[in-house]
Every structure is written in C-alpha cells, then in structure tokens.
Image (tube, rainbow, N blue to C red):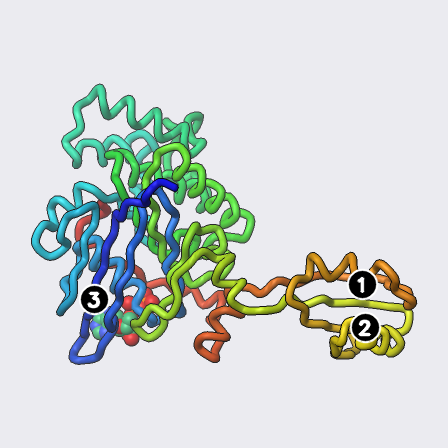
Amino acid sequence: MALKSTIIEIQDLHKRYNGALAVSGVSLNVYEGEVFGFLGPNGAGKTTTISILCTLLNFDSGSAFVNGFDCKREPGKVRQSIGLVFQEVTLDNELTAYENLKFHCYMYNMGKKLAEERIDEMLVVVGLSDRKQEIVKKFSGGMKRRLEIARGLLHRPKVLFLDEPTLGLDPQTRTNVWEFIRTVKRSTGSTVFMTTHYMDEAEVCDRVAIIDKGRIIACDTPSTLKSSLKGDTIHLKTEDDEAAMKEIFERFGLKAAMTEAGLFIIVDNGEKFIPRLFERSKTGILSISLKRPSLEDVFLNLTGKKIREGNGHGKGIVSRHGGA
Ligand code: ADP
C-alpha cells in the first residue's frame, strides 16, 4: 500500500480566550487527497482550529503545519496553498458568476489567459458553465455555495477549507453539495478539510475527527468509528411478537425487547443475522429492518450526550482577508 503523505499536521495545539481553553491539546494528521471532517457540537473548538490553520488566528502553544508550512512563521505561504469557503456568502451579488471569479484571479495575480482557462475549468467542475454570465443574486443558495467553492479552487490550492459548508441549505441542496465535494476531490485532487456539526455531513468524509470541549475524542473513518460500537439493531414486526421473542431466545440465546412498535434485537452483525432468522422461523415475519450504529451513537457513547442537530446559527470564521 502506498504511504499516505501528510498535508496538515497539528501537534498539541492550545488556544485560550481570556484564559479559557478553547482548543486543548489537539493533535491530528490529515492526509493528502482526503475529505476530512471536523465534527463537534457548537463551542467544541472547530472554528478556532480551522481559523488557526487558515492563519486567521494565533495560537498559544503547540504547532500547526499546512502543506509543510508553519502556520505561525510562514502564514503567507500557508495562504498561497489554501482555499477557504466561509459560512456566510462572500460573493458580490451584483456581479456575474464570471466577474466574481475573475476578481479572485486578479487578487491572486493570475495572468489573463490562465484566469480564463481556470474559470472555465472550475465552472465545469461545479456544473455552472451555462450560468457564467448570470448575475449572482439570481442564484439559489446551493448554486452560490458551488460558485464559492469554485472560487476557492481557482488558484489550485493544495487544501480547500470549508467551514460548515451546508449550513442553512435545504436537505436536497445539502445532498447535492456533498456529492459535489466528492467530485471536487476526484477532479482536482485537492484535500478537503471541513468543519461540521451535522452527523450526515460527516458520513460523506473519508475520515472524521470528533472534537468536544477543545479535545479530539476520536479520529478514524466513519465506518471504523461506527464498528467500534458493537451491535446492529434489528427491528422486527411479526404475527405474534411474544412467540417470536421466545423463539429468538431459544434459537439464538438473544433477548429481544418487546415494544408497541415491534421487537428490537441487538446483534453483532445484522446482515448475517437476518438470513439466519428467516431460515427456520416458525413465527410469521411481517417486516424487518436493520439500523447500523450512527456517528450520533458514537458521539453519544464517547461523551454521554447528543450533538444537537439543526441549531445552525453559524458564527464561522472571521473573514478578515475577504476569502483566501
Ligand atoms: P465551534 O466552532 O466548535 O462552535 P469555537 O471554536 O467557535 O467552537 O469556540 C470554542 C470555545 O471558545 C467556545 O467556548 C467559545 O465560546 C469560545 N470562543 C470562541 N471565540 C471566542 C472569542 N472570540 N472570544 C472568547 N471566547 C471565544
């Protein structure tokens, strides 16, 4: 297997605000080419960490390197290597999609020919080629987000930072943006680092670090994190729940929980269990469904609390540099 090269390296990072620790000993590595999710509830320290990585905020101790450059000593070089999409829309509504992108190319001192090439290339990636000359204020929320991501990629950054990329978007648009983030990764090879407090968003990442109270409490692929929780839940409806419960205990030694909604059984591997259950079942099975542990369950297991979903009153990174 090829060795993965590290593109973001954080060691024992600490950041205090007025004495209170917001980031408390964060260490992690992000590998080149992955979509990395930084998941945690509000106040966990996500924005502080991403702001440090984007050189928008100083830190007290530890180290942070992006693309081999020191966030403390080489902020200019870090900024050259990154693209950044803020929570709030930073496009100019009165300009066309093309003009918004052109302005960014100008800021990055790109020559005219190169700028035209990159703009066309990125509009294809984000599926907005046919809207190139349209005024941005006519765009939907999802289109604006895609255009911002295209803008963040124009100078071919090694890492694209997305701060809560689907905050405030409707469910359908959120799904589209996730698909699109994966497309970006495939077609540009950029590493994507995104903060989120949405579990379903974290599911689309290659790896996820879960942060709570300024500390990383787990870091792995979503499937490994979930498989650390032993047990799938089988939800079963039968013609006679009591008889089925007895039968399941006799055959498998498993105790099902009987509720008004049917039977619930925790098993090691639901996929293997279901065919075995059907094989010689004496009680008629009306319906069966399988629920795998979710990242929410992982978070609950690690912290004893739930990540509150849907409280997306984003505050986000301070846009001091107007958008890297
Ligand atoms: P998240 O992005 O995960 O919601 P933040 O990084 O914004 O978390 O915040 C981490 C902690 O630091 C929280 O307790 C928050 O109240 C505090 N904090 C964030 N920004 C400031 C600030 N500018 N001044 C004082 N405290 C802050």
Disc 2 + disc 1, Cβ < 8 Å: yes
Q: Position of residue 145 (x, y in %)?
A: 39, 44
Dot label at residue 277: 1
Q: How many marks?
A: 3
Q: Position of residue 59 (x, y in %)?
A: 15, 65
Q: Amino acid at mark 2?
A: Ile
Dot label at residue 112: none
Q: Amino acid at mark 3?
A: Leu
Q: Indicate the quadrant where residue 217 lies.
A: bottom left
| Helix, strand or loop status at disc 3 | strand
Along the line of sight, the residue nearer the viewer: 54 or 119: 54
Disc 1 + disc 3, Cβ < 8 Å: no
Query: Are there few (<14), some (14-19), or many (20+) residues within 10 Å of tag 2?
Result: some
Q: Position of residue 297 (x, y in %)?
A: 53, 70
Q: Which residue is mark 2?
A: 248
Spatial distance from mark 2 to mark 3, Cα to Cα? 51 Å
| Helix, strand or loop status at disc 2 | helix
Give the label, 1 or 3, closer to the camera: 1
Q: Is residue 108 left or right of residue 6?
A: left
